[in-house]
Amino acid sequence: MRVLLVEDDPTLNRQLDMALQAAGYAVDVSTNGRDAWALGDAEDFDAVVLDLGLPQMDGLTVLKRWRAAGRSMPVLILTARDHWHEKVAGIDAGADDYLTKPFHTEELLARLRGLIRRASGHASPVLVCGPVELDTRSGRVTLDGQHLPLTSHEFKVLAYLMHHAGAVVSRTELTEHIYAQDFERDSNTIEVFVGRLRKKLPPDLIETVRGLGYRLAPPA
């Protein structure tokens, strides 16, 4: 899952970047509104963490422009404690949730997980596909109730497919959602990760849809 982090405070930016990466997200970072708007307009993100008090272009304007352009990724806005009017304006502009500073990083991660789940149609924090279960809170994957060890990239590919179970996902889409913008992307490596996953998962759980991509589907 790929997240855009927009925060101009260097310390908080660094702390959140590290926390998001540790939680398994591919993270793109911006420290001003103009660059954030351009990134969100050009790239596909599973969620955005957006501070409203930004230089060059305020977060509310960034959000309004995204929504006006049809960008529908979930957005979690960050506001100062005494700026209650920003929360109202942010929600009215199209934000999906808000968090008041100061906050615990664990709460931000929990809210982010919830936004991403709901955006892909999942209410439960545990994603299930046949005998495979992925707990989005802990990052633990089980097969028939037994822990399934995965590398970080295997987990990212499986997590994206689990969030979009039943849908056809192209190699390009997978590449765009498991790597940050500054990472050297190679869609051919997706085949490698899918191949490794297939050796660890039940046969035919990950289907190849010729010419289109992959589909995660529970056994008949």
Image: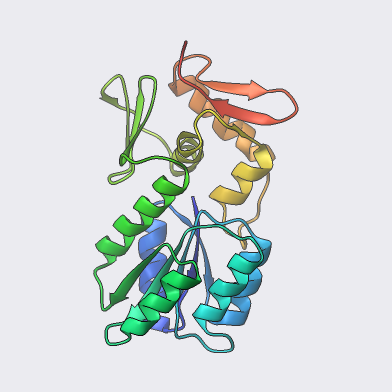
Can you name the residue that lies furthest to the right here? 211
Toward the top, the furthest residue is 220
> How many numbered tags mark residues here?
0
Residue 12 is at least partly visible in this image: no
Residue 71 seen in render: yes
Up-down relation of residue 213 to residue 200 (above or below): below
Q: Is residue 30 left or right of residue 209?
A: left
Residue at image point 58% right, 85% down? 57
Measured as percent of width and height from the top left, residue 156 is found at 47, 43
**Relative side of 13 to 27, left or right:** left
Q: Is residue 100 left or right of residue 168?
A: left
| Foreground of the two, 195 or 16 | 16
Where does the image place residue 176, in percent across and percent down from the top left? 62, 50
Q: Is residue 168 above or below residue 13?
A: above
Find residue 94 and report its horizontal and vertical position in percent: 49, 67
For residue 22, side relative to residue 195 (left or right): left
